[in-house]
Image (cartoon, rainbow, N blue to C red):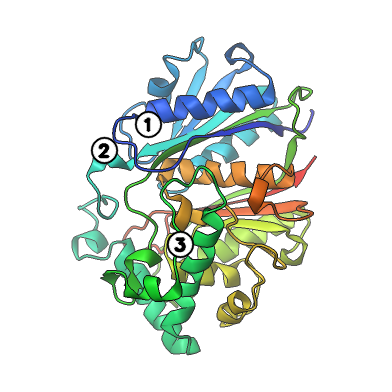
Amino acid sequence: MKEPLITGVGISDFGRFPDLTEEALAQAAILDALKDADVSMRDVQAFYCGNALGGHLPGQRALRELGAGGEAVYNIDNACSSGATALNLALQALRAGQYETVVVFGMDHLSSLGGGALPMNQRDWNNRRGMIMPALYAMRAKRYMHEHGIPLETLADVSVKNRRHGMLNPIAKFCREVTREEVLASRMVADPLTLLQCCPGVVDGAAALVLSTRSPRGAAKPVRVLASVVQSGLFEVHQVDMTEAEITRRAARLAYEQAGVGPDDLSVIELHDAFTISELLYYEALGLCGRGEAAQLLASGATALGGRIPVNPSGGLIAKGHPPGATGVAQIVELCEQLQGRAGKRQVQNASLGLSQVTGGGIWGVDHAACSIHILAAA
């Protein structure tokens, strides 16, 4: 069986588009991915749709106007990890020989939800008592700052870096460059996290991939998937360390083993910076540095464009935005463009190996409900 390759990518603008639907955004991304791969809808045997907040049958809604011929459509909801989970399932089917060419896409339209924090299940005990994501990450930030003696300025510098990257990304319509002082002076959301330390609450967008075991036809060099890992959170029966991103550390270990590489081999990373503290915690969980060393890694410039291991050259969730169903696929689009040398002004020099990491959701007794990690290489 031939190895499945990513042969085409497409992505919509990310921003606030109240006059568009998530279906329209997904259609634009899918058509761009098909064009990039030089294939048509008739060549596609199955579709995998990641969607967290769009309601019933999102994949079928997006495809009905594109001339799909009744092929299988799989709808995947795994919170913010939905799109990345869809990719994992598509790879399994391709490697099993079930299909030869598939499309993976993700989409969400937060403008239609009215703003504010993402709506959570109010039957969940944590959510009923106010332990929604900004509150949880604020507690993590407080604890991390206390244990490792880092100042507020370090958190702000994550936002400054990623927004600077985002200014180089033409699809990041919601982004503007900021200073450390602006970040710290912005409205408080959950102490110590100010508004500009949180990913935007109202962003719409979609992204798509073509994967195939057939000979590639597109002009761009195809991309290999060396590792694809999905893990679920553990039920916590004892006291836990809020500064330990256990699910990401566990998924990363499996991904490195699967790919036969380590963190020192990586060229570029796209990770789930829903809040500034998230990026620091994930530096450590991914093995980029030791426990308590994330602030030094950031301050060294290693994770900025031009540094040793650029993180979130797309701008990340903070600058590009976070339509949950689309995020995991959008990360893969960015990595593919980096590995293909098509990332324009934000191009990471000599990029050869990329990693994406996205977590999803929170429920009572579980730190995160899901985590997906992918490692990609140019074919």
Which element carries disc 1, helix, strand or loop? Answer: helix
Spatial separation of the CA atoms under disc 3 and disc 2: 33 Å
Q: Residue at x 29, y 35 (%)?
A: 18
Q: Earlier in the sequence, mark 1 or mark 2?
A: 1
For image coordinates 45% across by 68% down, the residue present is 276
**Amino acid of disc 1:** Glu
Type of residue at label 3? Leu
Residue at numbered disc 3: 234
Q: Front-most of 5 and 345?
A: 345
Q: Is residue 130 visible?
A: yes
Nearer the observer: mark 3 or 2; the answer is 2
Q: Indicate the quadrant where residue 350 lies.
A: bottom right
Mark 2 falls on what kind of element? helix
Q: Residues within 10 Å of mark 3 (few under 14, many from 20)?
A: some
Q: Which mark is residue 346?
A: none
Label at residue 112: 2
| Residue 338 screen position, x and y as percent | 69, 47
